Structures are given as C-alpha cells and as structure tokens.
C-alpha cells in the first residue's frame, strides 16, 4: 500500500515537472532585445515601445497582447497604407515564425501605449509584459529614448 501511494506521488510529481518544463520552454524560445520607449514632449499622453523579438525555438510563436502599469493600456499596432495615407491598425496577434525575429520599429510594428500615468524621463527604465498566444508572459525592460534613438543603443 505504501509503495502504491509513493508510485502515485511519483507519477503526479513527474507530471507537474513535465508541465512546468513545457511552460518554461515556450517562453524561453522568445528573446526580446533592444527594447525602447519613445520620449515625447510632456503633455503627450501616448507613446510607443519598440524592440526585437527572436524565436529561437522550432515552433512558431505569437504575441497577442502587451500589459503594463505605467500607462492606462497598451495595444499591438502596425502602420499600414490606406490608399495613400499611412495609418495605424491594431493587431490581434503578431506571428514570430520558428527561427525568425521580428522587429518593432518606428513606422512599422509597435506597442502603442495609451495614457501615461506620469511623464517619462530620458534614460528611465520602464517595464511591460508581452503575452504570447499560448498565454506565456515575457517581461521586458525598456529604456526611454529621444525620438530617433529607438532602434539604436549606443547612447547607453
Ligand atoms: Cu499605434
């Protein structure tokens, strides 16, 4: 009887460990680098975040949302051509194919940040979280930079 219980325990523990491994594995495949947030003049309530996200895994991944607590909300946006006008459109998801990387940059994909709680300062570090299609969370620390410095990091 004791043996039986310990076998059941082992199976349960193994199952939990395997689950934990797979949960870790999904987010470990995605690496975010060069994260920045654009500094806009005081009084402008909205801004954007940019970064490169790399999928080093063998399965396609997606980002479906961004969460933060230094502003009211964040959305995934792209710039698209609408006739001869450029406008922004919210994205339900951004796909990152296996082995590929996707760059969020000015004029393209960006995390749109609405309603800053307080004005940002140059070189300030802010945090946000990217949510994947399989509901993993990726914590990102971004540096607040002047417009024009979004994709470079030699000022750091
Ligand atoms: Cu936008």
Image (tube, rainbow, N blue to C red):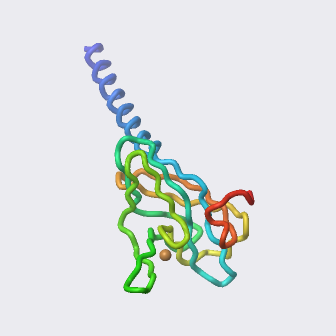
Q: Indicate the quadrant containing the C terminus: top left, top right, bottom left or bottom right.
A: bottom right
In screen coordinates, is 150 left or right of 56?
A: right
Residue 120 position, x and y percent, is 68, 72
Residue depicted at 67% across the width and 60% down the height: 125
Q: Is residue 105 above or below residue 87?
A: above
Which image quadrant is residue 88 in?
A: bottom left
In screen coordinates, is 122 left or right of 18?
A: right
Depth check: give the residue in front, 149 or 111: 149
Depth check: give the residue in front, 148 or 32: 148
Residue depicted at 37% across the width and 38% down the height: 22
Residue depicted at 39% across the width and 31% down the height: 17
Q: Is residue 5 above or below residue 39?
A: above
Which image quadrant is residue 116 in?
A: bottom right
Residue 81 position, x and y percent, is 41, 79
In screen coordinates, is 95 left or right of 72?
A: left
Residue 62 position, x and y percent, is 38, 55
Residue 67 position, x and y percent, is 49, 63
Depth check: give the residue in front, 63 or 156: 156
Q: Indicate the quadrant containing the N terminus: top left, top right, bottom left or bottom right.
A: top left
Residue depicted at 56% across the width and 55% down the height: 140
Which image quadrant is residue 99 in?
A: top left
In screen coordinates, is 96 left or right of 123?
A: left
């Amino acid at each position: 009887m004791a043996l039986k219980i310990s076998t059941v325990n082992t199976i349960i523990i193994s199952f939990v460990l395997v689950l934990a491994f797979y949960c870790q594995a999904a987010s470990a495949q995605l690496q975010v680098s060069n994260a920045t947030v654009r500094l806009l003049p005081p009084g402008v309530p909205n801004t954007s975040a940019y970064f490169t996200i790399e999928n080093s895994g063998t399965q396609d991944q997606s980002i479906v949302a961004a969460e933060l607590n230094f502003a009211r909300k964040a959305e995934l946006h792209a710039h698209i051509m609408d006739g001869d006008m450029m406008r922004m459109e919210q994205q339900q998801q951004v796909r990152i194919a296996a082995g590929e990387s996707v760059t969020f940059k000015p004029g393209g994909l960006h995390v749109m940040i609405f309603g800053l709680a307080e004005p940002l300062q140059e070189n300030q570090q802010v945090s946000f979280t990217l949510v994947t299609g399989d509901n993993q969370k990726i914590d990102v620390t971004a540096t607040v930079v002047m417009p024009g410095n979004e994709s470079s990091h030699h000022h750091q």
